[in-house]
Image (cartoon, grey):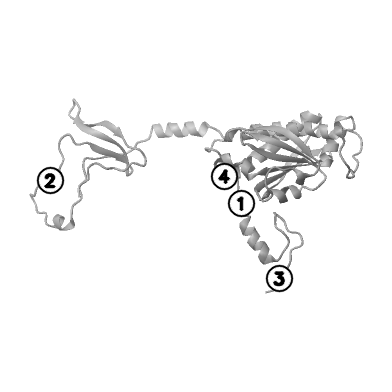
Amino acid sequence: MNQRTLRQPEGGLTAGSIEEQIIQMASLSYERLPLLESIFERYALTLGSAFKSFVAMPCEVTLLSFEYLPCGPALEAIGAPALTAVARADPWDARIALAVSPELLFSTLEIMLGGRNGDSRAWSPRSFTAIERRFCQKLAEMVFDELEPGFEPVGGVRFRFDHLENIPSNAVIAPPATPAVRIRLQVGLEGRGGTLDFVIPDNALESIRPLLSQSFPGGDIGGDSGWREALGRSISGSEARLTAVLHEVRLGLREVLDWAPGQVIDLGIDMEHEATVSCNGRALFRAAMGRRKNGAVALRVTEELGDEKERDDGRAD
């Protein structure tokens, strides 16, 4: 079979034959996190309002991509130079990275310094000044602060700014081979703007992964609770059929075939024996049998049965 080489491998794959990359792709199959994707979709909407307050200009934030790939390739794919803010996530006991593109940094800086009506200039790669780094820190802190409320439904987190790196690949947040998520946001400021890239390693999400793998935590994130009230009213007025089983005995088929009319079958129970009450085949509780003053047969609950507890009401072999 002929072998071909892919020139531009993506998603953390190294250059090589198609067969080699198929093997790598099998090892890079990560579990999707639907709730995390939903959090950042909502975050894009709220971040637009935060940017508007930050620069006093209408702003539009769009979620461009959400990728699952190793941490090293995720940082390298951002491109350099780009100021990258590293933040500590408490109580996750981990770090995440936020890369601010030079286009967004200088567009925001020019607007806040009075250059709103001026034409934007193409940025040529160079080292960042102390003022630019300080401004990027303020911008990153605002972006991190706005992200915190999005994680409240899954337990909450605090992002504390740690330091800046000029090159994204220099941001040490996890080993290069660690699975990670890279989220890219496009920030538009009246014809200007740039991108924000979040890189969140897998170890940062370990404690809340069971929740993030669901579509919604408990099914109630951002939802309307009115349906619960309507469902509760419907259930309260509905009827359920209960079945009371006094006793069950297991007999051999030969003995059953020998039964004749008038024969008395000893069940081995007395008047104090309790019945097992079930609904739709599931045992709910045990109850003592008796009669009310009007002569009707009644049951008095004596023991509740758990969901996983089987009925063991003295069955005989």
SS class, disc 1:
loop
Mark 1–mark 3 distance (CA, rounded to whole Å)? 27 Å
Identified at 74% across, 40% down, the residue is 98
Mark 2–mark 1 distance (CA, rounded to whole Å)? 62 Å
Q: Which mark is residue 30?
A: 1
SS class, disc 3:
loop
Q: Give the mark nearer the N terminus: 3 vs 4.
A: 3
Q: Which mark is residue 266?
A: 2
Q: Quadrant of residue 100?
A: top right
Q: Quadrant of residue 50?
A: top right
Identified at 70% across, 66% down, the residue is 17
Q: Give the mark nearer the N terminus: 1 vs 3.
A: 3
Determine which residue is flagged by label 3: 3
Front tag of 3 and 2: 3
Cβ–Cβ under 8 Å for marks 3 and 2? no
Mark 1–mark 4 distance (CA, rounded to whole Å)? 11 Å
Cβ–Cβ under 8 Å for marks 3 and 4? no
Mark 3–mark 4 distance (CA, rounded to whole Å)? 37 Å
